Image: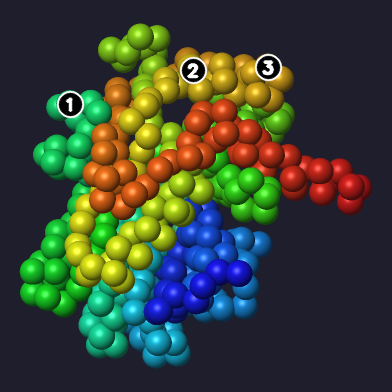
Amino acid sequence: MAIMPHDPYVLVTGGAGYIGSHTVELLLRRGYRPVVFDNFSTGHRALLLNDDWIQGDLRELESIRGALQKYPFQSVLHFASHCYVGESMDDPPKYFFDNLTQALNLLRAMLEFRIPHFVLSSTCSVYGHPQQVPIPETHPVAPTNPYGESKRMIERILEWYDRADRIRFVSLRYFNAAGAHPSGRLGELHDPEPHLIPRVLQVAAGIRPFVEIHGEDYPTADGTCIRDYVHVVDLAEAHLLALQRLQRTGQTGIFNLGTGKGYSVKEVIRAAQKITGREIPCRSGLRRPGDPSDLVADPTRAERDLDWVPRHSTLESILETAWNFLKVPRRRQEREG
Ligand SMILES: NC(=O)c1ccc[n+]([C@@H]2O[C@H](COP(=O)([O-])OP(=O)(O)OC[C@H]3O[C@@H](n4cnc5c(N)ncnc54)[C@H](O)[C@@H]3O)[C@@H](O)[C@H]2O)c1
């Protein structure tokens, strides 16, 4: 049985989403009382794991105030956000207005209720086009899209709140989240799905006709973009470690979450063909504006200061769990007729 943590109540904004739901699952197993706050705009009731959830919208201050007064929270994990690079290029106001309003409302309500600890879902998009790879946290930040810029702005707001002794925070800069829970119960359910691995697997499953490769003329060995894929279960573990560090030391910090190893688009497709045993037809497409050729983390700081070990983040494990998750509803559909 898990030992009851000292401050078990944790607010999880966006806990009905992909990464948030995996983190809730881990928190529950470790004896915490996570309470999900979600407007279900991109999240799913099917990903909720217990009855501690509140339907609310962070863009409304009263909504988040109401949630914070119900439980004795000491910590918040903030996943809720718009999170697509491409969409942010088409609609910057959506990303700046909503992502910032949500964070500001949440921080304001946290100060009112004297909640000191905040963990932010940040992103490698804050670095823009890297000057060196692997990318350490000390690399200059220069986002090339409104999504990354909105996350960097939230980090900067947090840095000022920290300086004023109002909030202690951990910002986790994820590289490419991927994979699914080994149980097959939780996984990625974005609609439309912007991420490579689920799209590739949807082609393998016959849900999509082909994978479009966005650019084959990058300065990489096979001409396609290289990304650092980190298993969502390892991301959940990093959130728990970040929370424990905040509760134990009250120390603010920024950490990359990646493996230090990158795979090209073509390598991912080949590995997916092997794991699924299916043909995955591809078509050549145009480069996407603002896509850097190579994004790979230097995860040394998280490994050293959080004791984080990304145990699940081999490409095989990522593809196998994501494939397993994709097949579950199909199996159910088949059973139901
Ligand atoms: N998926 C990735 O590869 C990746 C990479 C880097 C960073 N991130 C960050 O991780 C976080 C989670 O990403 P995800 O892939 O799980 O996304 P997701 O869309 O699956 O989850 C986001 C959740 O937030 C909720 N939400 C959105 N706006 C809200 C609002 N105004 N009020 C309340 N709830 C709201 C949604 O309903 C959803 O449940 C995001 O902040 C994202 O920017 C994701």
Q: Earlier in the sequence, mark 1 or mark 2?
A: 1
Q: Is residue 152 above or below residue 143?
A: below
Between discs 1 and 3, the one toward the N terminus: 1
- Please name the amino acid that badge 3 sits on: Glu
> Label 3 belongs to which residue?
279
Alpha carbon separation for disc pair 1 and 3: 35 Å
Q: Is residue 158 visible?
A: yes
Task: Name the quarter where the N terminus is drawn.
Answer: bottom right
Q: Which mark is residue 132?
A: 1
Q: Earlier in the sequence, mark 2 or mark 3?
A: 2
Q: Nearer the viewer, residue 23 or 20?
A: 23
Asked if 75 appears above or below 241 in the picture, the reply is below
- In the picture provided, is 250 more to the left or to the right than 263? left
Farthest residue to the top: give it: 221
Q: 121 or 200, which is in the foreground? A: 121
Q: Residue at x 62, y 78 (%)?
A: 51
- Give SS at disc 2: helix
Quadrant holding ligand 1?
bottom left
Look at mark 2 in the image and give the residue it sits on: 267
Give yes or no for contact between labels 1 and 2 (Cβ–Cβ under 8 Å).
no
Q: Position of residue 193 (x, y in %)?
A: 53, 42
